């Protein structure tokens, strides 16, 4: 292949590839970009549901029907962002698995630390702080 043929192939590839890539990206996000606050809210809701359902640390918890009711679940970009947030803060012991009977559902495994902290805090109850001196 000569230099001119290579240049033509690159131009054709760019003319087809760039619009196709932009289209695929837009379809993948469904035209929706999440803010960091939305990602955190999604992650907090998923964490709360997982903590309520897990009876022991290390148990796989199927959240298929819960995820099916969430507005973000049909968007592929939520997985990386929301699951990444839960992995980075230590909530999940490992990546979720597609064990669910519900289409698109996932099963999650809490880390022992997250489970223990949640149940310890629940056993202690809500904390009430005493006003410091000069404040009432």
Image (tube, rainbow, N blue to C red):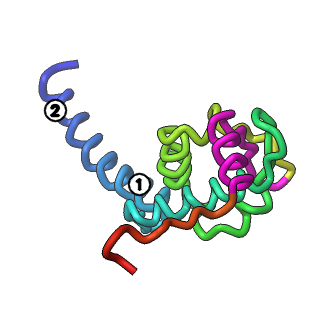
Residue 121's mark? none
Q: Name the element at disc 1.
A: helix
Tell me whether the residue at label 2 lies in contact with that at label 1, contact meaning CB atoms closer than 8 angstroms.
Answer: no
Image quarter (top left, top right, bottom left or bottom right) of the C terminus: bottom left
Q: Residue furthest bottom?
A: 136
Location of the N terminus (image quadrant): top left
Looking at the image, residue 3 sits to the left or right of residue 17; the answer is left
Q: Residue at x 71, y 42 (%)?
A: 108
Residue in front for this viewpoint, 99 or 5: 99
Q: Where's residue 73, x and y in %?
A: 62, 60
Q: From the viewer's perspective, tell me whether residue 80 is left or right of residue 67.
A: left
The reply, left or right, for residue 36 in relation to residue 129 is left
Q: Is residue 104 magenta?
A: yes
Instruction: Name the residue furthest left.
Output: 3
Give me the residue at 61% from left, 70% from top. Answer: 71
Q: Position of residue 74 (x, y in %)?
A: 61, 61
Secondary structure of the residue carrying numbered label 2: helix
Numbered tag placed on residue 7 in the rendering: 2
Spot occupied by residue 90 in the image (x, y as percentages of width and height):
54, 38
Task: Provide the residue span drawn in magenta.
Answer: 102-124
> Between residues 81 and 16, which one lies in front from this camera angle?
81
Residue farthest to the right, as pictured: 101
Pick the front one: 76 or 131: 131
Q: Foreground residue, 85 or 127?
A: 127
In magenta segment, residue 76: no
Task: Name the residue that disc number 1 marks.
Answer: 25
**From the viewer's perspective, is the residue at label 2 or at label 1 nearer?**
1
Quick one: label 1, few (<14), some, or many (20+) residues within 10 Å?
few
At a point 41% along the width and 65% down the height, the residue shown is 37
Q: Indicate the quadrant where residue 32 lies.
A: bottom left
């Amino acid at each position: 292949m000569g230099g001119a043929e290579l240049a033509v192939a690159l131009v054709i590839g760019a003319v087809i590839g760039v619009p196709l890539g932009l289209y695929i990206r837009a379809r993948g996000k469904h035209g929706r970009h999440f803010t960091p606050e939305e990602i955190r809210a999604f992650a907090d809701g998923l964490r709360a549901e997982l903590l309520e359902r897990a009876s022991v640390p290390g148990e796989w918890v199927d959240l298929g029907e819960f995820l099916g009711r969430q507005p973000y679940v049909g968007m592929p970009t939520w997985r990386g962002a929301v699951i990444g947030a839960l992995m980075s803060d230590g909530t999940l012991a490992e990546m979720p698995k597609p064990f669910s009977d519900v289409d698109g559902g996932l099963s999650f495994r809490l880390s022992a630390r997250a489970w223990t902290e949640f149940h310890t805090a629940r056993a202690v109850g809500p904390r009430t702080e005493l006003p410091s001196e000069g404040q009432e």
